[in-house]
Image (cartoon, grey):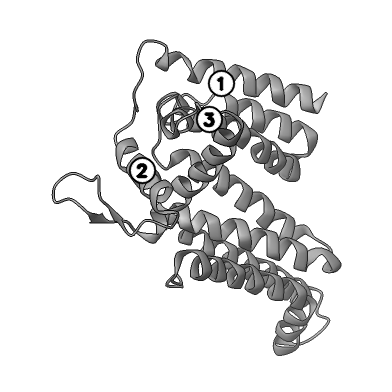
Amino acid sequence: MLVGYLLALMAFTTSVLLIPGEKYDTLTTSDSGWVYDVAAEIDQTNALAENNRLSHAPYGLSVGLTQQAQPLITVMLHRGVNAINPSVTLMDTVKYWAPLLFALSLIPIFLIGKELGGDVGGYAAAFFGAVLTSSIYWMKVGAYDREPIQLILGAWTIYLTIKLFKAPRSEIPKFALLAGLVYGLFGLAWSGALFIAPIVVGGLLFVLLTGFLGRLIRKTTDLSGALFSAIRGHLSLIAGVLGMLAVMTLVLWVIGGQSPML
């Protein structure tokens, strides 16, 4: 039932997002051309783009670290599809990139809703995600701004972070690794991804504060004892959060060649 429900929502939203491309064959949002040029550069050089040789004057504008993920993943997808059907061009892959990613984004959106509100929350989250009106512009056929990759990687990062905070001690390393890997890719897709780091750290501080106040209210120890007890009781989570941020930094350093300013 769940799979059928999500597939039905994916089919519905894809059918809507394909409507704008019925009468023309071009990229459809403001920065799509720039991002496509970066993808073409990656495809031609087999490496991350340092400059956009196809940019408007002055030609050869530099390409930032946080502009690489979407073009890179698009080229990887294109080469896989092209190996099966050589007639598929990079432009063909780019045109249908946004509807594809938006449909796939309903999966982590459902999972986030389920973690926070049970099955009902998951079904509701997926439904309301599928009928977002703003997606008609940013996710329609031919749209190749960064919004599609921001949505899917942002949603997976949030879901895996929630799982990290809710995980039993034995599973914290697994979710710290997964969350860090996805968060690192998110950082390669959008510079604003780094603003999630204070939210993650803030969530950890909230957990520690809750434990600290709980111990004080129960009067089981003094002020300093309550503080150290709260920290000691959440050492695994503290290590998990630090591990997640460390993996994210490593991904940016290994793939992007530099580390973020944290």
The answer to which of marks 1 and 2 sits earlier in the sequence is 1
Identify residue type, mark 1: Thr
Residue 91: which quarter of the image?
top left
Q: Which mark is residue 35?
A: 2
- Mark 1 and mark 3 in contact? Answer it, CB < 8 Å: no
C-alpha span from label 1 to label 3 = 24 Å
Which residue in the structure is indicated by mark 1?
14
- Residues 14 and 192: in front is 14
- Residues 106 and 122: in front is 106
Which residue in the structure is indicated by mark 3?
86
- Residues 10 and 26: in front is 26
Label 2: element kind: helix
Which quadrant: the N terminus?
top right
Identify residue type, mark 3: Pro
Label 1: element kind: helix
The answer to which of marks 1 and 3 sits earlier in the sequence is 1
